[in-house]
Amino acid sequence: MSAAFEGLAQLADPLVIVCILVGALAGMLVGAFPGITATMAVALASSFTLTLDPVPGLAVLLTIYVAANFGDRVPAILVNTPGTPASIATTFDGNPMARQGRAGVALTTSAMASAIGTLVGLIVLVFAAIPLSRIALMFGPAEMFALVVFGLTMMVGVSGDNILKGLAAGAFGLALSSVGRDPITGTERFTFDILALSDGLPFIAVIIGLFGIADVLDQMYTHRSALHSPIREMGRWWPDRSELRTMLKPLGIGSAVGGAVGAVPAAGGDIAGILSWTTARKASKEPEKFGKGSLEGLTASDTASNATLGPSVTTTLALGVPGDSVMAVLIGSLVIWGYQPGPGLFTSQPDLVYTIAGIMVAATLLTLGLSVVRSRGVTRLLELPPHFLWTVIIVFCMVGTYAVNNSVVDVVVMLAFGIAGLFMRRFGFPAGPVVLGLILGSLAEGNLRRALEIGGPANILTSPIAMGFLVVAVGAVTVPPLVRALRSRRAAARAAR
C-alpha cells in the first residue's frame, strides 16, 4: 500500500496537474485532425518534455496518448475518416449513425465506451505489471534474446498484408541499431567519424522524421479536396435507457477482446476494434444492423480499441518490448530520463505503476468530460485549411528536434528520415518495424552474444522459455501468409462453382 500511496501522491504536484490538462487538450486536437497520429504527437511532444522531470513529462505523453484515442472518434463519426488507425472500426457504424441524424448519440456513446475500455485496461496494468516483471526477472540472456525476437516478429506479423515488406522494414531498423558503439566492446561502428553518432542515431530525431515529417509530406503529396463535409446536425446527445441496456453486452465483449489483444506486442487498437466489432456482430441478436448504424457495433469497437492502452503499457514497461508505436516512443523518453524499461523497472520502483495508472485514469476522466461537452464548433476544426497545420507541425518538429541536444546533426537526421519515411509510405513499407528494430536491435545483439559466450547455441536451444518465444515468433511470420493463401484458395474455389 505504501507504493500505491507514494505513486498516487505524485499526482498532487500542481505541475503534474497542469501537464495533464495540456496533454488532454493537445491529444483531443491531435485526434480530431485526420492524419495527425498519436505516435506523431507523442514523438513531437517528447522532444519538449525531456527538460521536465520524469513524472510531469510522463503526464504530458501519457495524457496525449489517452486523449488522442478519444479525439480520433470525432472525424471518424462526422467525416467518415479515422483520426488515427485505432478508430478505423468506429467508421463502420459511427458515420452511418451520424448520417441518420444521431451524431450526438454516436459521439457520446463513443466517449463513454472509450472511457470504460480505457479504465478496464488500466486494471490490467495495476494488477499484472508487477507480477509480470517479477517473472521476467528470472530471464537470462537467452530468454531475453528470444523475448526481443518475439517482439520484433509480432510487429512484423501485424504490419500489413505484405509480410516481406514488414520483414524488410524490421531488418532496416536492426541495421540502424548497429550505428554507434558496440554493446559489448564499445568500439565505434558506422559513425563515419561524426561525433554526434557515437552514441547511435538520435532516437527522437528518427521517430519525428518517420512519423512527423513523413506524415506531413505524405499529406502534402496526396492532398485532395475533401470528399465528405462534416455533419452539422447533431440531434440528441444522450443515449436513452434502452440504448444504455443495449450497450452492456458489447461493453463486455470489447473489454475482453481489447484486454487480450493489447497484451500482444504491436497488436494495437485498430486490430482490437475490428476483431471486437466482428465478435459482437456474431453475438448480436440483430447482426444485420452492423455496418448500418448499430449502437452495439460502435460500442464494441471503441471499447476494445481503448482497452488495449493499459495492457500495452504493461507489456512495454514490464518486459521492455513496445506494445505499439507510441510505446516505442515512450521507451526512448524513459531511457533518456534514466529509466530502463524491462523486468527490473517495476520491482525496483513499484510506485511507478500507480503513478502511471493514476495519470491515465485522470486523463481518461478529464478527456471524457471534454468529449461530452456539446461543442458544435468541433466540426469547424475539420474545415481548417490543412496547409496551416502542416506549417505549424514542420516548425515544431524542427525546433523540438534541435532542442533535445542543440545539434544541427539531429535536424539533418530528422529530415533525412522524413524523406525516407515518405518513400516507405509510397511503396507500402510500414514504419513501426523500423522503430522497433532501432530500439531493440542493440538489446537483441547484446543478449545473443552474452548467451553464446555463456553456453554456445545450446544455451538457447535447451531453454524451454527461449524456444517457446522463438517458436511463436516463427509462427507470427509464417502463419498469416498461409492463412491468407488458404482463404484465397477457398474463395477461388467458391467462385469457380
Image: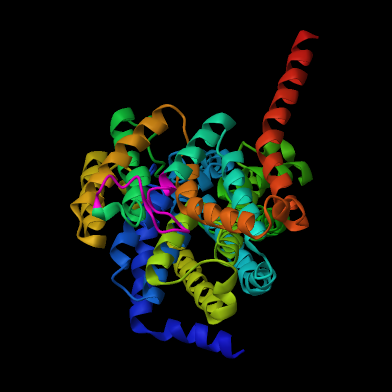
Examine the structure image and report whether residue 177 is included in the region drawn in magenta.
yes
Residue 312 quadrant: bottom right
What percent of the width, then of the height, locates residue 301? 61, 48
Determine the residue located farthest toward the right in the rendered image: 497
Count the marks: how many?
A: 0
Which residue sits at x=44%, y=83%? Answer: 10
In terms of secondary structure, what is the magenta stretch mainly?
loop
Q: Which quadrant is home to the N terminus?
A: bottom right
Determine the residue located farthest toward the top in the rendered image: 496
What percent of the width, then of the height, locates residue 364? 50, 67
Q: Is residue 23 left or right of residue 479?
A: left
What percent of the width, then of the height, locates residue 318? 59, 67
Residue 474 quadrant: top right
Q: Which quadrant is home to the C terminus?
A: top right
- Tell me: residue 319, above or below residue 469: below
Residue 162 quadrant: top right
Determine if residue 439 is in view: yes
Question: Bounds of the magenta span?
Answer: 176-194
Q: Is residue 386 left or right of residue 132?
A: left
- Tell me: residue 205, above or below residue 365: above
Q: Nearer the viewer, residue 297 or 319?
A: 319
Q: Nearer the viewer, residue 373 or 164?
A: 164
Which residue sits at x=64%, y=43%? Answer: 294
Which residue sits at x=44%, y=61%? Answer: 330
